[in-house]
Image: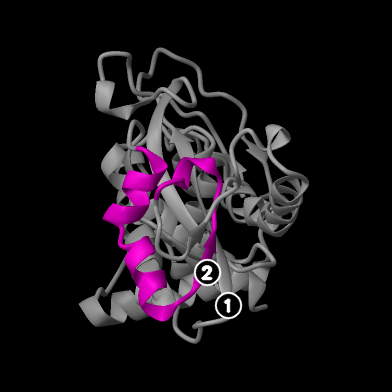
Amino acid sequence: MVFSTHHASSEEPRLVPYRATVDVPHELVEHVSWLIYARRCERRTRWRKLSCFKQALLTLVHLRKNETLPAPAAGFGVSTATARRYVDETLDVLAAWAPGLHEALAGLGEGDFVIVDGTLIATDRIHADEPYHSQKHKQHGMNVQAIARPDGTPLWFSRATPGRTHDLTAARAHGIIQACLTRQILILADCAYQGAGATVRTPYKNHREQPAHYQQFNHDHARLRAPGERAFAQLKSWRLLRRARCSTRRIGTIVQAIHTLMTCSCSR
């Protein structure tokens, strides 16, 4: 793959291109390319500037490396606008394969437990964008909720909501609390979810001032909940989500698309 920072102005010099690699399995690129091929057949697309494989690779490079689109676009020999269309199309294809909430909880029931947590996807919003500012994290971003298995494997990611949304408010709005209550699934969550009731279990506050069995409960709770951090660690291994420069309306689609990629990687 060749990257170049090509400038539209003829007065500015073109920089020397160079070869680069991206740390994703070749099988994953092939899998995504087959999904793109199916979409092209569905739309009866006759010709594209890039093959299905190169379109898949372009999208994975963008997600994994979080470079601005002009650089990889020049490397693939297309315009920035074309690269953006290809990336958006691929993200939509991948996001369509992400499981819904009820689908993710299928097979779980009474006696099972899941880990629920929230994270902030940092964005480049300005200070005036008040709805996107998180007082907890002291930065702008979008709130995303996750449900994970006891071993930390992500089952489901929510759509993105403005950063100032409280975790408990977001969990209720997405239907997580009610869905788990209906199936009698136990939820382990942090202190941000205190007051949720239902089947949600959170640690005791000021536990050091409480009896010994309260402290033991918090210790066991933290031990069982700790693997849930893996879900967001895997999600943010795709560097685009460490600081998103795209529209906030696209972050939810990106999260769903990456979840599909994570699922494909785990199954191979």
Q: Quadrant of the C terminus?
A: bottom right
Comparing 96 with 36, the one in front is 96
How many angstroms separate mark 2 from mark 1 (CA)? 6 Å
Instruction: Please state the horizontal and vertical placement of residue 64, each as a whole percent of the image.
Output: 58, 47
Instruction: Please state the horizontal and vertical placement of residue 225, each as a whole percent of the image.
Output: 66, 55
Q: Amino acid at mark 1?
A: Asp
**SS for callout 1:** loop
Instruction: Please state the horizontal and vertical placement of residue 247, each as a whole percent of the image.
Output: 30, 37
What residue is pinned by disc 2? 186
What residue is pinned by disc 1? 112
In this rendering, the answer to whether 4 lies above or below 42 is above
**In this rendering, does residue 248 appear at all?**
yes
Which label is found at residue 154? Answer: none
Report the span colored magenta: 166-195
| Residue contact between numbered discs 2 and 1, judged by CB atoms under 8 Å | yes
Q: Mark 2: few, some, or many residues within 10 Å (few <14, many ≥20)?
A: many
